[in-house]
Image (tube, rainbow, N blue to C red):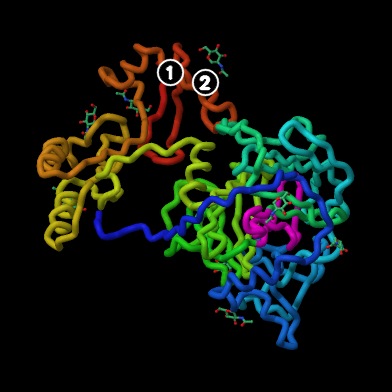
Amino acid sequence: MRPNRKTTIIVVVVGIVVLAAVITPIVYFAAKEGNADEQKEDDDDNGQGGGGGGEKPTPDRSGRIDCYPEARSSNITRTKEACEKRGCLFDSEADTNNSLGVVCFYPAEGGLGYSLTREEKTQQGFRLYLEASGRSPFGGDFRKPVLDVHLLSNNLIRFTLDDFYASPRRYRVPVEMHLPNLGADNPLYNFHVTNRSKLSFVITRNSTGKVIFDTGPGGLVLSDQFLQLTTRLPSADLYGLGEHSRRTFRRDFSKTHSWPAFSRDQPPGGDANLYGVHPFYTCVEDAHGNTHGVFLLNSNAQEYELSPGPMLTWRTIGGVLDFYVFLGPSPENVVQQYTQMIGRPMMPPYWSLGFQLCRYGYNNLTNMQRAVEQTKSYDIPQDVQYADIDHMNESKIFTIDQVNFAGLADYFDMLRAGGMRTIIILDPCIIVNETDYEPYEEMKKVKANIVWPSDFDIPANSSDEDGSMLGFVSLCFSLFISVQIL
Ligand SMILES: *[C@@H]1O[C@H](CO)[C@@H](O)[C@H](O)[C@H]1NC(C)=O
Ligand SMILES: *[C@@H]1O[C@H](CO)[C@@H](O)[C@H](O)[C@H]1NC(C)=O
Ligand SMILES: *[C@@H]1O[C@H](CO)[C@@H](O)[C@H](O)[C@H]1NC(C)=O
Ligand SMILES: *[C@@H]1O[C@H](CO)[C@@H](O)[C@H](O)[C@H]1NC(C)=O
Ligand SMILES: *[C@@H]1O[C@H](CO)[C@@H](O)[C@H](O)[C@H]1NC(C)=O
Ligand SMILES: *[C@@H]1O[C@H](CO)[C@@H](O)[C@H](O)[C@H]1NC(C)=O
Ligand SMILES: *[C@@H]1O[C@H](CO)[C@@H](O)[C@H](O)[C@H]1NC(C)=O
Ligand SMILES: *[C@@H]1O[C@H](CO)[C@@H](O)[C@H](O)[C@H]1NC(C)=O
C-alpha cells in the first residue's frame, strides 16, 4: 500500500441546520418545471451534455430516455415502425455516435404513464394507487401499480413500486434489511408528487431545497419483465453503481452510455457483466458537500444508463423497484446509514489490501516461482501469492497435484517466512469412489446433506444414502468428478 495515497473527499462540515418548522413530509403539489435552472449552475463541468440545444436550429435532443436500449449492444436495427410499436418516438436524424443520439425514445408528453387515482395513509407513510395509460413496450403490464412511500427515519426514505394484484406476490430479495423504526418526526427530506396525471415525483433536501431525486424526465415502465425508472440528478458528482471496469470513481455523464449488472464468473473487460452487483450510488449535491445515497434492492438482471442532464435510468427484468434514499448529509453519514441497513462490511486484514499476484494456468510450480522471482527482480512490490485451482489433483478438493505442484507447501512456507501471504483457491469437488479420500470420509461422518436445486441439470438420483449432494459438474471442468452412488 502506498501510504501517501489519501482519500480526497473534502467535506465542508456545515453546522447542522436545525429544522425549525414542524415538517409535514407529505406535500403534494402540481409542480412547475422548477429545478432545471438550479441544475445548470451545478453542472458546469458537464455543460456539453445538458440542455445546450436552445441556440442551435437543431431539435433539442437532450433528456431522452432510450426506448431501444438493446440496439446499443447488438446488431438490431431500430426501425421507425418497431420504435413506434413500443409507443416511442423515432428520430431518424439522430446521430447514434453523438452523445445525445438517442434514436428511439419515450415521449415526454402522452405515451405510457401512470396516473394517481387514490392515496391512503399507511403506518410508515402513504400508498399511492396508480393506473396505467398506454401500454408498456414489452407487455405484461402491472395490473394495479402501487407506490408505497415509507418515511423510515429522518434520514431514510424508501419507496417501492409493486403490483398490488400480483399473485403470487412479485419477487422481493429475501435478504433482511436492518430498517430503522424510529419514524420520521423531523425528516431531512420532502417527498412531492409533481404530476398526478402522468406520475412523477421528487425528493428534496429540506435544508437546501435541492431536488435530489426527480422522476420528471418520465420513462417509468412497470411490467412483468421490464421495470424502468429514470431520475434527473442534482449533479454529475456521482460515484458507485458497481461492479464495472471504468477507470475513474466518478461516473461520466457527458454521453449516453450503459452497462449491465448481473453477477457471473466473468473477468473484467469492456462493459460485460462482472462477478458482483452493487446497485448503490452516492451523489454529492453541492459545494457544501451535501451528499445522499440511493440503493435499489433488486437482484434481477439490471442495467444502468447514464446520460447528459445528468440523468440516470435503472432497468431491471424482474422483482419490484425498491429504492432507499439516504440523506446523509455528509458522505460519511450516507455510508454509515447505508451500512447500518445492509450490514457493516467486515474489516479486511491490512495485508489483503496489498499487491496480489494470481493466475490460473501457471501449470507447474516452476512457472509460479518464476513469476514471483521476476516480480521481485523488477522491484514490483508483492504482498500475496495465489495458487489457483490448477494446483489440484484432478480438481479434487484438498489435494495437490504431486507431479506439477510437488513442493507447493514448502514453497508457500518459504514465502510466508519472508513476510508474504499465500492464498489457495479451491473449487469444492469431492470424489466419491476413491478409497481413503479423506474429505468424502469426513463429509459422511458428519452426514453432510447439501441438496441439489431441483431444476439443476444433473442426473436424477444423485445423492448417496445419507442424502449428500453428489453429481456431475463436468459442464464446467471436464476433470470434475463423475459420480457413482456408493
Ligand atoms: C422543509 O419542510 C417544510 C415542511 O414540509 C416546508 O414547509 C419547508 O419549506 C421546507 N424547507 C425547505 C427549505 O424546503
Ligand atoms: C455485429 O455484426 C458484426 C458483423 O456481422 C459482427 O462481427 C459482430 O459480432 C456483431 N455484434 C453482435 C453484438 O452481434
Ligand atoms: C459512427 O461511428 C462508426 C464507427 O466509428 C462509423 O463507422 C459510422 O460511420 C459513424 N456513423 C455516423 C452516422 O457518423
Ligand atoms: C403532467 O403530465 C401531463 C401528461 O404528460 C402533461 O400534459 C401535463 O402538462 C403535466 N403537468 C404538469 C403540471 O407538468
Ligand atoms: C512447467 O511448464 C512449462 C510449460 O508451461 C514447461 O515448459 C516446463 O518444462 C514445466 N516445468 C516442470 C518442472 O514441469
Ligand atoms: C492423484 O490422486 C490419486 C489418488 O490418490 C493418486 O493415485 C495420483 O498419483 C495423484 N496424482 C497426482 C498427479 O498427484
Ligand atoms: C471413479 O469413477 C470414475 C467415473 O466412473 C472412473 O473413471 C474412475 O476410474 C473411478 N475411480 C476409481 C478409483 O474407481
Ligand atoms: C433413486 O434411488 C432410489 C433407491 O436407491 C430409488 O428407490 C428411486 O426410485 C430412485 N429415483 C430415481 C428418480 O431414479
What residue is shown at x 63% (from left), y 54% (from top)?
207
Image height of 265 relative to 473, above or below = below
Q: Report x, y in % for residue 108.
A: 80, 66
Quarter of the image where one finds residue 61: bottom right
Q: Report x, y in % for residue 83.
A: 78, 66
Which residue range is magenta in the image? 204-232
Mark 2 = which residue? Answer: 461
- Respond yes or no on whether mark 2 lies under 8 Å from ligand 8: yes
Helix, strand or loop at disc 2?
loop
Q: Does the magenta-highlighted stretch encompass residue 333?
A: no
Quadrant in which the N terminus is drawn: bottom left
Q: Which mark is residue 485?
A: 1
Which amino acid type is marked by label 1? Ile
Q: How many marks?
A: 2
What residue is shown at x 65% (from left), y 34% (from top)?
183
Q: Does the magenta-highlighted stretch encompass residue 218?
A: yes
Quadrant in which the C terminus is drawn: top left
- Respond yes or no on whether mark 1 lies under 8 Å from ligand 8: yes
Which amino acid type is marked by label 2? Asn
- Which quadrant of the render holds ligand 8? top right
Image height of 201 relative to 108, above or below = above
Q: Out of 303 and 199, give the one closest to the viewer.
A: 199
Helix, strand or loop at disc 1?
loop
Q: Report x, y in % for residue 174.
A: 60, 31
Give yes or no for contact between labels 2 and 1 (Cβ–Cβ under 8 Å): yes
Quarter of the image where one finds residue 88: bottom right
Q: Report x, y in % for residue 119.
A: 85, 41
Quarter of the image where one finds residue 145: top right
Image height of 398 relative to 201, above or below = above
- Mark 1 Cα within 10 Å, few/some/many (few <14, many 20+)? few
